[in-house]
Image (cartoon, rainbow, N blue to C red):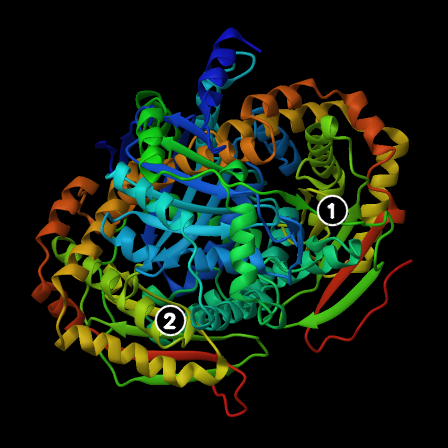
């Protein structure tokens, strides 16, 4: 690495961190030259957090509670957060993933007021039977919208085949049936357990200073919460739950998903293992590979066919997928290529190019205020900083990849899902 | 922003981008859309994106991009209000991040120009093998539009709305014409584009002088006769046409298209921006607050506006059984804004939201490029700051006057209904 690039990376990855007496982590990246501010206030509570003990009482949640809570935290007795933000003009939103819930705004002015709004409504839960019933209707429609998305259905079908117990197998929003079980008491318990400053971070990037953010946190006077919260881990067997699944829906062409369930790495190897999985997906069917060229030239797949990884507490898997006119044949080609690379070793030039590409992607992710704030929250929730990610990537060797491939992407721990166009005759999976 | 003409029908716009880690060069060819050439012109981007004369193999090109630290190369074609636009764009991390001191930005510009002006030809035409492969991809691209139901419903409605008008020329061409494409026809389409297109080059954070010289060099020997671009044109008002298409979906889709009967003049656009945002562009808009939140008739309900076509689009995700009620509620909200009161608070809220969006334009490369390219296409060249001032000056009466121009032309529904008809 040249001295110039080293300094550039140091500037790009720099941020300030403060942990307040109430336990809240504050992360700020002032970015000169930017007009706007992007703030993200989040908690380590997502759709996979389904069982916990709060002050001695066990709670087992139906699917979709974290997402439901996200919707409901947007309103209190005085109205919803959108109405509050309308007074400042900020663009506000929220999202729930497998392992976190985040509330955010982006604004090009009135930073202090926007921070005050963000911190106030997320800190004051308010639910009634009536407001919950209304939200069940809205979220029910959201679930139906996703039910029509072939990519979404493919992804969750693969997770359901790979995982028999882990909640990653269930839609983040839950189902119409599961959210019908949600009660005000359940939501208050979740807010009490997970929306506590010790479990949360405020990440802000852009035209802002740490002092502005700390002043806002002080104004919000977020109290420390007492009591004990214990997450109950899931016992997930190594074997997959279901080897094959096939169904139909209105699509123009079949979709194929091939997932590989991986053994969980030791915590100190987590980041490196994720990079190894990422690099392997590129080395197997990325646009530089002979397999991709064959698939493309023979019109076996659409351009989006690719691999990606999922890594959340208790689950790590790699999923290859996309549109293909011959799903069984493409699956076989994919497995053949993995076997070939395992026996022959990966191409040294391709490996270097993949690392180059990933480095560029990491730098690009440090460019926009929204990506930077999200990266800071990730630094909190996953316990890693952008600088550590770049260092870990740089340290990976060709030998690491070849060695990892002896254990990763094993057929024995794989599952296959095929979505066929509605009305098409069901085919057989190739053995 | 600096903009100048560097040759007949060729313009360079330079946008400073010192705060970003990446830089980007894009070359936009703009020429009148023509139904007769649509499918050949749709195939061109696919062929241009896979390789060029300087790098005549798609795998080698992928490796070159990876060597440039994952630089992006895209060739994209759209139809924009009667004009065909083909954009070649290359972007990547700035030189200071190169691990070994490489001059990356020079390579980005060279790659963009090579892709735009020097395709890989075999015996004077696009590589026949590549043409055969990309024809299949194009065919599937056309067929796959049904996978995304929301976008599909809007596209179907637009087809009914535009009919045979130039603005309705299909971005991806026509499935029945793909078979007939040959290397010769696509090559003719390419040279027709080189000859007749206006060329808009945008350099974001790249050395504009170097880009200018490279463009002029690339143009040497090319016979140019830039065609006039079609004037903005709006569909005339007509009696509403209603369509239902059966599809086995969990959620129904509803799209309503309205015409203003005339294109929006750029200086009047801010009033339309406020009106459409107030109607259905924010989380406090009438459609969101009333149709979604109050009446629970849909999951989403949003309004958008294509100023050059005078087209207002409202699309919604609805329970199948609620589609008719949702349509009625949407029309009532529009009528209420046309004739009823607009509070000072909701007008002020809407303006603040719009100004917030305008203030953020300069915070992303994509935002800056999209903004100034849109302004260039409209021929206005307002800065976001100027538009903020215009937004501030919009009155309730301006909002009403804009919305009163719109009449419903097409409603299109994806439904489970047995009596659906297209």
Q: Which residue is mark 2?
A: B292
Residue shown at the point (56%, 53%) measured from the top left: A190
Tag 1 and tag 2, C-beta contact below 8 Å:
no
Q: Position of residue A186 (x, y in %)?
A: 57, 61
Pointers 1 and 2 within a single chain = no
Residue A73 versus residue A196 in the image, above or below = below
Of residue A153 and residue B381, the one placed in the foreground of this image is: A153
In the image, A142: left or right of A259?
left
Q: Which image quarter holds the C terminus of chain A?
A: bottom right
Q: Secondary structure at mark 1?
A: loop
- Residue A208 shown left or right of residue B273 in the figure: right
Helix or strand or loop: what does disc 2 sit on? Answer: helix
Camera-side residue of A407 and A383: A383
Residue B199 in sight in this render: no
Residue at 19% across / 61% down in the picture? B346
Q: Position of residue A403 (x, y in %)?
A: 84, 27
Using the numbered discs, state the Cα–Cα distance from disc 1 to disc 2 in whole angstroms: 38 Å
Left or right placement of residue A339 versus residue A9 in this view? right
Relative to B361, say whether B378 is above or below: below
Mark 1 neighbour class, 10 Å CA radius: few under 14, some 14 to 19, many 20 or more:
some
**Can residue A46 be seen at all in this image of the molecule?**
yes
Is A402 in front, or is A175? A175
Q: Quadrant of residue A32?
A: top left
Pinpoint the chain carrying mark 2: B
The residue closer to the viewer here, B247 or A66, is A66
The answer to whether residue A376 is above or below residue A78 is: above
In the rendered structure, the residue with mark 1 lies on which chain? A
Residue A233 badge: 1
Q: Is A377 on the left-hand or right-hand side of A115?
A: right
Point 31% across, 30% down: residue: A215
């Amino acid at each position: 690495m040249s001295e110039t690039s080293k300094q550039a990376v140091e500037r790009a990855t720099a941020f300030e961190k403060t942990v307040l007496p109430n336990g809240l982590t504050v992360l700020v990246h002032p970015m000169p030259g930017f007009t706007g501010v992007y703030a993200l206030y989040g908690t380590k509570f997502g759709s996979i957090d389904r069982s916990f003990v709060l002050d001695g009482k066990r709670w087992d949640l139906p699917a979709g509670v974290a997402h439901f809570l996200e919707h409901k935290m947007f309103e209190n007795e005085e109205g919803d957060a959108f109405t509050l933000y309308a007074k400042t003009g900020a663009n506000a939103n929220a999202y729930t993933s497998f392992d976190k819930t985040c509330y955010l705004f982006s604004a090009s002015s009135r930073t202090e007021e926007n921070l005050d709004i963000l911190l106030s409504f997320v800190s004051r839960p308010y639910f009634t039977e009536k407001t919950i019933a209304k939200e069940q209707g809205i979220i029910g429609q959201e679930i139906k919208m996703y039910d029509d998305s072939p990519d979404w259905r493919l992804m969750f079908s693969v997770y359901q085949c790979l995982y028999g117990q882990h909640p990653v197998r269930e839609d983040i929003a839950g189902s119409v049936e599961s959210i019908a079980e949600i009660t005000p008491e359940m939501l208050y318990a979740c807010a009490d357990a997970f929306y506590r400053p010790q479990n949360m971070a405020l990440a802000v990037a852009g035209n802002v200073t740490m002092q502005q953010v700390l002043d806002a946190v002080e104004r919000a006077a977020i109290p420390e919460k007492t009591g004990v919260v214990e997450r109950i881990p899931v016992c997930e067997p190594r074997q997959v739950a279901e080897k094959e699944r096939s169904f139909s829906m209105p699509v123009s062409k079949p979709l194929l998903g091939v997932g590989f369930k991986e053994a969980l790495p030791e915590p100190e190897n987590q980041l490196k293992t994720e990079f190894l999985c990422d690099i392997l997906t590129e080395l197997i069917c990325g646009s530089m590979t002979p397999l991709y060229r064959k698939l493309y030239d023979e019109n076996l797949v659409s351009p989006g066919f690719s691999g990606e990884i999922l890594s959340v507490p208790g689950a790590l898997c790699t999923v290859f997928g996309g549109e293909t006119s011959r799903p069984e044949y493409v699956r076989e080609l994919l497995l053949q290529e993995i076997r070939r690379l395992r026996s022959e070793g990966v191409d040294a030039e391709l490996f270097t190019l993949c690392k180059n590409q990933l480095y560029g992607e990491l730098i690009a992710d440090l460019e926009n205020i929204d990506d930077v704030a999200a990266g800071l929250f990730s630094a909190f929730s996953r316990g890693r900083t952008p600088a550590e990610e770049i260092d870990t990537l740089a340290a990976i060797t060709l030998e690491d990849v070849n060695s990892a491939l002896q254990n990763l992407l094993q057929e024995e721990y794989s599952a296959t899902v095929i979505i066929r166009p509605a009305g098409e005759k069901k085919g057989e999976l190739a053995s | 922003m600096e903009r100048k003409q560097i040759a007949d029908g060729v313009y360079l716009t330079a946008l400073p981008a010192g705060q970003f880690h990446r830089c980007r060069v894009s070359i936009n060819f703009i020429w009148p859309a023509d139904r007769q050439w649509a499918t050949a012109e749709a195939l061109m981007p696919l062929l241009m994106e896979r390789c060029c004369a300087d790098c005549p193999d798609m795998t080698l090109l992928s490796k070159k991009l990876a060597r440039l630290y994952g630089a992006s190369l895209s060739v994209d074609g759209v139809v924009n209000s009667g004009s065909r636009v083909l954009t070649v764009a290359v972007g990547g991390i700035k030189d200071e991040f190169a691990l070994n001191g490489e001059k990356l930005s020079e390579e980005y510009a060279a790659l963009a120009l090579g892709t735009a002006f020097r395709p890989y030809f075999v015996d004077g035409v696009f590589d026949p093998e590549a043409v055969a492969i990309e024809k299949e991809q194009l065919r599937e691209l056309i067929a796959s539009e049904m996978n995304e139901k929301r976008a599909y419903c809007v596209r179907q409605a637009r087809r009914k709305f535009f009919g045979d008008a130039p603005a309705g020329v299909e971005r991806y061409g026509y499935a029945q014409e793909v078979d007939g494409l040959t290397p010769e026809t696509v090559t003719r389409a390419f040279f027709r584009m080189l000859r007749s297109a206006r060329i808009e080059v945008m350099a974001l954070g790249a050395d504009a002088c170097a880009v200018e010289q490279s463009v002029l060099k690339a143009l040497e020997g090319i016979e140019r006769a830039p065609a006039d671009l079609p004037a903005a044109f709006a569909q005339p008002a007509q009696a509403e046409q209603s369509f239902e298409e059966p599809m086995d979906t969990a959620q129904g889709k509803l799209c309503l298209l309205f015409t203003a009967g005339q294109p929006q003049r750029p200086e009047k656009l801010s009033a339309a921006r406020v009106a459409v945002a107030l109607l259905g562009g924010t989380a406090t808009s009438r459609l969101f607050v009333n149709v979604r939140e109050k009446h629970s008739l849909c999951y989403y309900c949003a309004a958008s506006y294509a100023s050059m076509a005078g087209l207002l689009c409202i699309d919604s995700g609805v329970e199948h059984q609620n589609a008719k009620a949702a349509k009625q509620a949407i029309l009532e909200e529009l009528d209420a804004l046309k004739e009823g009161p607009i509070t000072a608070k909701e007008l002020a809220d809407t303006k603040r939201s719009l100004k917030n969006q305008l203030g953020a334009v300069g915070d992303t490369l994509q935002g800056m490029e999209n903004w100034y390219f849109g302004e260039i296409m409209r021929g206005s060249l307002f800065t976001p700051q100027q538009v903020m001032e215009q937004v501030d000056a919009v009155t309730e009466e301006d909002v009403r006057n804009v919305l009163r121009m719109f009449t419903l032309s097409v409603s299109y529904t994806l439904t489970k209904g047995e009596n659906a008809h297209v």
